[in-house]
Amino acid sequence: MNTTLRFLTFATLAGALTAATGLQAEPYHGEGHLIGSPDDLSWGPVGSMGEGAEMAIIEGDLSEEAPFTMRLRLEDGYEIKPHIHPAYERVTVLSGTLHFAHGEEYDEDATQALSEGGYAIMAPGEPMFGYAEGETVFQLHGEGPWGIEYIDPADDPRN
């Protein structure tokens, strides 16, 4: 898929993801402080990840070319099938254990366990996969527009 088409696909998916969940927050513009607690978060489904995954947007609109911060909560055993993103993904595990790896083929034995405080940074277009051990919450931040493209379209719960 050429770069322009891939970008347009990701932008469309990011917009649909945000619109479908109704979850979005205002971007922080550096004025004053943005302060909150976990109790302030509004969790909702993640259409692009299916059952067993929830997200809460802390700041930003995933469909816009702007910074965003969100949290993902995965149930125990949730599998993240091989996929790519259009921009850098920066992840910090807050609770549980995220087993994570680089590659186009799902292989639990190839993953590295990231427990509380563990982090990962993935480059745009680099395939990745993983799974949750115990209920796992991680914070993801990056630059929009955001989207996800599964290596195998059959893994995409939107199909």
Image (cartoon, rainbow, N blue to C red):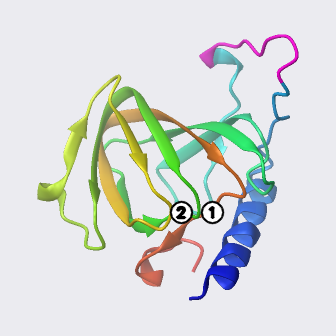
Q: Are marks 1 and 2 in contact (CB under 8 Å)?
A: yes
The magenta-colored residue range is 30-38
Q: Residue 80: horizontal and vertical position, in percent?
A: 38, 58
Cα–Cα span, label 1 and label 2: 6 Å
Q: Residue 15: horizontal and vertical position, in percent?
A: 78, 62
In this view, the residue in front, 39 or 1, is 1
Answer above or below: position of 56 versus 77.
above
Q: How many numbered circles are shown? A: 2
Which residue does the numbered mark 1 point to in the structure image? 147
Answer above or below: position of 149 versus 129.
below
Answer above or below: position of 157 versus 42.
below
The quarter of the picture where the N terminus appears is bottom right
Residue at image location 31% in from the left, 54% down from the top: 130
In this view, the residue in front, 19 or 29, is 29
Question: Which residue extends farthest left?
Answer: 109
Q: Earlier in the sequence, mark 1 or mark 2?
A: 2
Q: Is residue 137 magenta?
A: no
Q: Residue 85 — which label?
A: 2
Q: From the viewer's perspective, is 131 left or right of 33?
A: left
